[in-house]
Image (cartoon, rainbow, N blue to C red):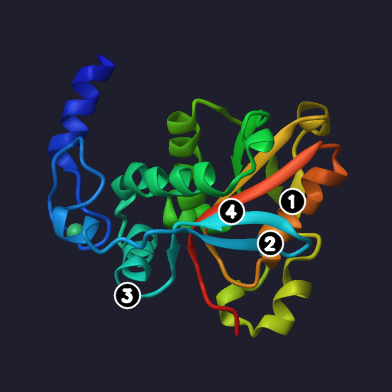
Amino acid sequence: MNSKIKKRLIGILYPNRCPFCDKLINENECACEKCIGKLPEFSVKRHALGGWLCPAPFVYNGCYADAVKRFKFLKRKNYSADMAYYIAGSILELYPPELLQAIDYVTCVPMHKKDLKRRRYNQAELLARDCSELLGIDYLETLKKVKYNKKQHTLKASLRYDNVKGVFRCIDPLQVKGKNIIIIDDIITTGATLGECAKNLKKAGCANVACAVFCSAQQF
Ligand SMILES: [Zn+2]
């Protein structure tokens, strides 16, 4: 099918919605006027475990947490482009210019195939692909989740570090060797998951790794 027609059909079937309140908005808008008026002025500067820079445009509460929940659990896949717009904004705001200019690839935190079968989509991959398009940087699948572990949000912080150890593997070290890569996910909480992904890429030979997410959840 012609890609223009396909895009129009998708627009009719899945109209653009404000990710923060779910109201219908125009195709060229990223949020409704009311929600735009309440957006925080600055991004949150976080670091994944191991010290990898990880900006987030929003704190995980109120309408920002609701946006993530609908995106992940209520199949609001079409929030992705709008959410990526804000992630890309926080990357531009908080990445040092020398890193920003040197990024080779955008990648994502992978999902285990069992979870992917259940949800049908990896929300982090949708965000990473849309960030790649917005930033004009290629998307590359770099990591695979090779072990099925407990869900991080079901564990207290002290157990989360061990739970993600050894669950990811770099798909092709030759492809990432000497490259500067950014890893996208929806949320950072303890930073253990993103930290483990970054560590794997670095071990595989990446020159620099950094992260970015949509929401920063409070550590507990
Ligand atoms: Zn709204």
Foreground residue, 206 or 150?
A: 206
Circle number at residue 198: 1
- The part of the image, by quadrant, that contains residue 178 is top right
Q: Give the x, y percent position of residue 112.
A: 61, 55
Q: Name which residue lies at 86% across and 37% down.
A: 205
Q: Earlier in the sequence, mark 1 or mark 3?
A: 3
Quarter holding the N terminus? top left
- Residue that carries the numbered disc 4 in the rendered image: 111
Ligand 1 closer than 8 Å to label 2 CB: no
Q: Which amino acid does label 2 sit on?
A: Ala
Local secondary structure at mark 2: strand
Q: What residue type is labelled 3?
A: Gly
Mark 3 and mark 2 residues within 8 Å of each other at the beta carbon: no
Residue under the point 81% across and 60% down: 166
Label 4 secondary element: loop
Q: Mark 2 points at which residue?
A: 48
Task: Specify few, some or many for label 3: CA neighbours under 10 Å numbering under 14, 14-19, or 20 or more.
Answer: few
Circle 3 residue: 62
- Say whether disc 4 or disc 1 marks the residue closer to the N-terminus: 4
Tell me which label, 1 or 2, sits earlier in the chain.
2
**Marks 3 and 2, Cα distance to the nearest angstrom?**
23 Å
Q: Is residue 179 in sight in this rendering?
A: yes
Task: Tell us which disc is closer to us: 4 or 1.
Answer: 1
* Secondary structure beneath label 1: helix
**Real-space Cα separation, disc 4 to disc 1, in angstroms:** 15 Å
User: What's the CA distance linking mark 1 and mark 3?
Assistant: 29 Å
Q: Which amino acid does label 1 sit on?
A: Ala
